[in-house]
Image (cartoon, rainbow, N blue to C red):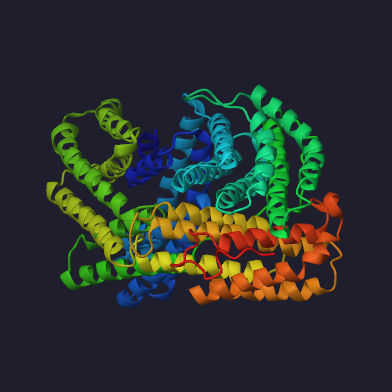
Amino acid sequence: MAMWLSMRLELSSPRTAMVSVVILMMHQHSGMVLARGFYRAAGMLVGNLAALMLFHAFPQERVLFFAALSIWIGLCVAGAAYYRNYQSYGFVLSGYATCIAAVPAISNPYGIFDSMVVSLSEVSVGILCAGLVSGLVFPQRVTAILLGAGQQHLTSFISFIRQAVHGGQAGNTLWLAHLRLTGERAQLENLRSATVFEDPEMRANNDLMIRLNHDFLDAVARFHGIHQLRARLIKVADHRAGDALRDLFERLLAILPAAEAGGRLSLAQVRALHGDLKTLRATLPAQIVSARTALDDTTPATRDRFAAGAILLDDGVADLLAFTGNYVALRTQRPPRAAPVTDERPEKLLNSANRAFALASGGRASIAILACSWLWIASGWNNGGSALISTTIAIALYSVMPQPTTVARHMLIGCLAAWIAGMVFNFAILPRLDGFPLLAVGLGPVILAGSYLGTFPATAIVGLGFGIYFCFLTNLANPALYNPVGYLDGGITTLLGIGMASLAFATIVPTGSAWLADRYLRQLRAMVAMRVCYGSLAGLRLTFESNIRDFVQYAGTRPASGSASRETLLNWSFAALEIGLAVIYIREAVERHVMPGPWQAQQDLLLAAVSALFQNPSLQMRERALNTVEQVIRETASTADGSGGNSGVLTAGPARVRAQLHVIRLSLIDDAFPLSGPPVQAAVEVA
């Protein structure tokens, strides 16, 4: 359709429309196609306007022109690496659209406006055709995919909760479950972003889906904390707190449904779970008070351990109740009646991307484009502009992918196969075709082959590269040209451009480098040291949990060994999660409750010690933080014991603060804390 319409409109290069269709229909669900099409149109418009400005500023200064072009594309790639989802795609398009519009017109500056009009027209044709076909011909709705993926995600989430609450699971097992959950949640967020373009009902429920994500982040953090607490209680001499908590945890385990092997939880099961959670939520405080009464003759440390677990369980049940309520409401189009709201949650999160990674991506793109521009000028290669365009597309498009070096290699294979297939088509088949119907019949099998390869995970990138570069290199033009030498030259330049991009990915700040991992780790620790300890509480917890989720996803891509291994980064992420959330809860409790006078001074000591530990991590700073936490626990013992008695375990501010202090202490003395060597006072019990 795109090729035919471009030819009927007498556009000079139908390949641009064809390539647009291939890229947009990489994901053939109509919502995703529409979303990508919208941002592609916006990106192409901005990119073409940038090309016009470059020609206005440097019409005859080729060196300055290429320097400005490389800076602009570098900024666009940096923006693509910094932002998420389709915003990222818009930045990518803004970058390489400038190159596509500007480079062919560099020898004829007065033709830039005509080049812009033709380029935007061809892209519009591609977007129109892709949107119509994806929406009308065997449409695949994102909404159905989203609901199905959400059902599978809920099943995995309940399984994760069962593992966390049951205890006894190896750390690696829970890590893998946590990584799977965060990956699933990120994919659901991508699908949510696409449904707003497709389904009016889902667009109306967008706020509900956002709250569902918020509830998930809260709940997964609390149940992970329960697992860590249970693992540490096994190591202490007095097991009475652990025994009392185990009885409470069993009440939750008893109502959690288990899906059949390979199955998913049904909506009826989730409804039943939601009702059981309401009942448990209503009876849990009395059960906690009863269990706490049986521990009156134990040490304050034992009572603190019990309080920490009880508070985590109570909050976790509340978050899970809200999650299941919103889940059911999304599928029944009814607002949840009893979804507890624990705090005001912002609709938008502050971006958690790493600035160093974004700047490194932009710098890498600028260097690659400058190198290719220099090669073009130095060699005098007539077709060097095609190499520059190919390098720009590759360096921009692949930068936002998780493993750009691997993607570039697979794209290179797809491009080579497309070059050979295009050679056969152009010079053996095309001269024998008469009229558009025969042309469509001749192209059909080749396009089908690339799309078929794209349906398998192992060959998806190869298939995408084959489809893109077959349309690009075959270059069905108005009028058609029989030019074998130009075709061979164009294929070599395209392969060279992808090769230069692959070399840049492998040598200039590789995504798997220890330097980049260290930048991510510094960002994580700085977030705890500054924002968690001293930042505004408005939206802090949600933003913090979202940042941790993204960091856990990044840590999952790291190698198993090395100075910045996956285990090291995951240990840091979980330590930051436990200590950071405990600090946030302490600050929130102090803000909501009228606390005794000494608390503010003790809180200042605690925040200073935690901030110093994450700013300059060392065994000495860890020891100092542990001493401070133990000092605060000792000096607030009498105040907490007198603030509400047993009934104050869940309601009194001092009791909740002491419980969180104990969570911090247990995290600091844990063997998995990411600093070599145990703390000197690890075995000391706090009286």
Q: Considering depth in this image, is 267 or 476 the residue closer to the camera?
A: 267
Task: Return the x and y of residue 482 as percentages of the image width and height.
Answer: 16, 43
Residue 582 relative to residue 61: left or right:
right
From what the image shows, is residue 288 above or below residue 251?
below
Q: Considering depth in this image, is 224 or 671 the residue closer to the camera?
A: 671
Residue 121 relative to residue 498: left or right:
right
Task: Return the x and y of residue 620 as percentages of the image width and height.
Answer: 52, 77
Task: Return the x and y of residue 378 as percentages of the image width and height.
Answer: 18, 73
Quadrant where the image shows the N terminus: top left
Name which quarter of the figure residue 199 lies in: top right
* Residue drawn at (68%, 49%) of the image: 309
Residue at the front extreme?
Answer: 297
* Residue drawn at (51%, 50%) of the image: 85
State whether residue 204 appears in this view.
Answer: no
Residue 498 relative to residue 553: left or right:
left
* Residue drawn at (24%, 49%) of the image: 412
Q: Considering depth in this image, is 50 or 206 the residue closer to the camera?
A: 206
From what the image shows, is residue 614 above or below residue 336?
below
State whether residue 57 appears in this view.
Answer: yes
Task: Return the x and y of residue 672 as percentages of the image width and height.
Answer: 48, 58
Residue 120 relative to residue 152: left or right:
left
Name which quarter of the figure residue 166 lies in: top right
